Image (spheres, rainbow, N blue to C red):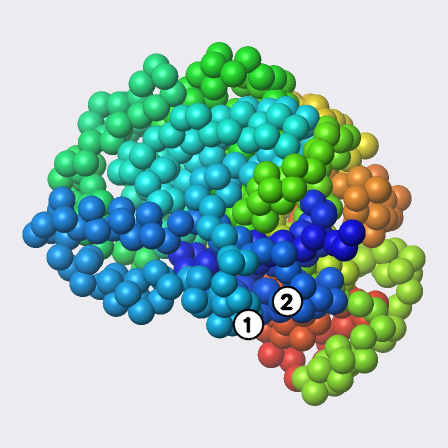
Amino acid sequence: MGKTYILGISAFYHDSAAALICDGEIVAAASEERFTRIKGDASFPIEAITFCLDSAKILPEDLAEVVFYEDPVEKFGRLLTSAFIGIPKSIVQFTVSMPDWISNKLWIEKKIRKELGLKKGKIVFLSHHLSHAASAFYPSPFEEAAILTVDGVGEWTTLSWGTGKGNDLTLTNALRFPNSLGLLYSAFTFYTGFRINEGEYKMMGLAPYGKPDYAETIKKELIRIEENGSFVLNQNYFSYAHGIKTINKKFEALFGQPPRRQDEPITEFHADIAASIQQVTNEILLNAAKHIRRETGMKNLVMAGGVALNVTATGSLRASGIFDNIWIQPAAGDAGGAVGAALHRYYRVTGAERTGRAKDLMHAGFLGYNITPDSKEDDEALKELGAVWTEIGDNEMFAEIAELVSEGKIVSVAYDRAEFGPRALGNRTILADARDPAMLQHLNARIKFREGFRPFAPAVLAEDADQYFDIKGDSPYMIFTFPVKESRRLPADRADSITKTASLARSDIPSVTHIDYSARIETVNREDNPKFHAILTEFKKRTGCSVMINTSYNVNHEPIVNTAKDAYKTFMKSGIDFAFIGNRRFDKAKQPKNESKGGKK
């Protein structure tokens, strides 16, 4: 028998992506933004598809099927229903959205056939939350598990839960639009002055600087949390169901201020609002998890959907002990739906056996574009940019990176396969010294060009993690927060501004310790991530510390770098001191075209 290739596609909302599986194995997966360099690119992912097919050295005609991650007809039905119910308020939204639907989004099958040259009969549609559920369960390390998916909205569903066992997956319960935890969180994202579908991370980072003074107001006026794990939103305060905006004047009056404009300062009020909605979000997820555990009796939980990327909520859920084990799809948002769609089709159609395994099937997240050390194409592209470098072997590179970071330098690395999902896990990463209390502000201001309160995540040797953090087990995907150990904490008060407060040292690894003494951890083990493990090991030899700052190799409002060319361009327009791209070493001081916006600390 020949191999069975199935392509999964997500597109047309945000973060379009493609994923290719072969006989149940994930061969490649990537977001379109990595190739087009458009943050959150929602267009048809032809570049990501081409990459996936090239990775397997196959043509479109070699595909058994192509699976789209949601049902466009059902989604269109929701938009029509919402528009009809919301007249006359919905007229503007309807007028704005319909041309794209009529000319593009409704005819996805035709678009796929045209782009890939496929005949009819090879294209299949799966529901949005079933794609999320499959992306969570099938790659997980569990033989059986409860499943929870939470996001803004798919076709109609906003939250679903069910169970998976072997190759069987069933969603038994669902919450429907307009009751949506994702849209509730996004409404507050807009209200605090951040961009929806991008600024949720910012609001989550802002929350620990505030007090949850408005949490009871939210629960009294905006949402009713039910004992069965569900909730109901009071639509009198929201506009997203029928209008272009997410909130209305009644929402603003409830909290006493208009939405913050993006150019306005962030105040204590905004921090308190962020803290309040984060506390309510945590409570909603815990309530749902308790109900699911009671109903299913299962000890394992898997999660996907955009809300599953809220690391504060998932950290709280993991710490609660409601479930013995939790695994979250590292590409939990819409991009991961491409993986789920393909895997669901494979297991349900072929009936292939799926058994529990010691590790998940995500290949540590390294499913994207490959930067190889001996690529002549990369050499030519870099020479065209005027780049100057020296070749370096692996062991020498690991030692030099560790030495440079220990000296206070900012170092970027881009080699091997890129990560799939929103987290940089060591292959498209900027590294710095977590022990330096000035590093947080330096990185935010001179490297990432972003708000000064934004925290940075630590990468730590897996075998040493419990020496720094209250953690049991591994956290390889930066998808949970954990407390910094009491023995490492330092007392710190609050300053007269949020940025100054962020600068205060709260532990002996201050630049990865958030104001609430939490950290979003990546544990690095030798088997899954040998190069990064070697770098951290060399750093430990020099400093006695197993922890480094690990932040994504990009600047604000840009996707994480993908190719060697991307990596060099970002290196040159930021304050990064040294870059290692493939097995090439780049010293900023020796580059003839130094466009750096950074500078000395």
Residue 244: give x, y in percent of width and height. 22, 55
Question: Secondary structure beneath disc 2?
Answer: helix
Residue at image position (68%, 84%) is 385
Residue at image position (20%, 57%) is 93
* Residue 90 as seen in the image, left or right of residue 149: left
Look at the image and tell me in which quarter the C terminus lies: bottom right
Residue 117 bears which disc, if any? Answer: 1
User: Type of residue at label 1?
Assistant: Gly
Residue 61 bears which disc, if any? Answer: 2
Residue 358 bears which disc, if any? Answer: none
User: Type of residue at label 2?
Assistant: Glu
Residue at image position (19%, 58%) is 94
Question: Secondary structure beneath disc 1?
Answer: loop
Residue 306: give x, y in percent of width and height. 46, 43
- The part of the image, by quadrant, that contains residue 207 is top left
* Residue 426 as seen in the image, left or right of residue 566: right
In the picture as drawn, the residue positioned furthest to the left comes out as: 88
Residue 367: give x, y in percent of width and height. 69, 54
Residue at image position (51%, 72%) is 115
> Disc 1 or 2, which lies upstream in sequence?
2
- The part of the image, by quadrant, that contains residue 581 is bottom right
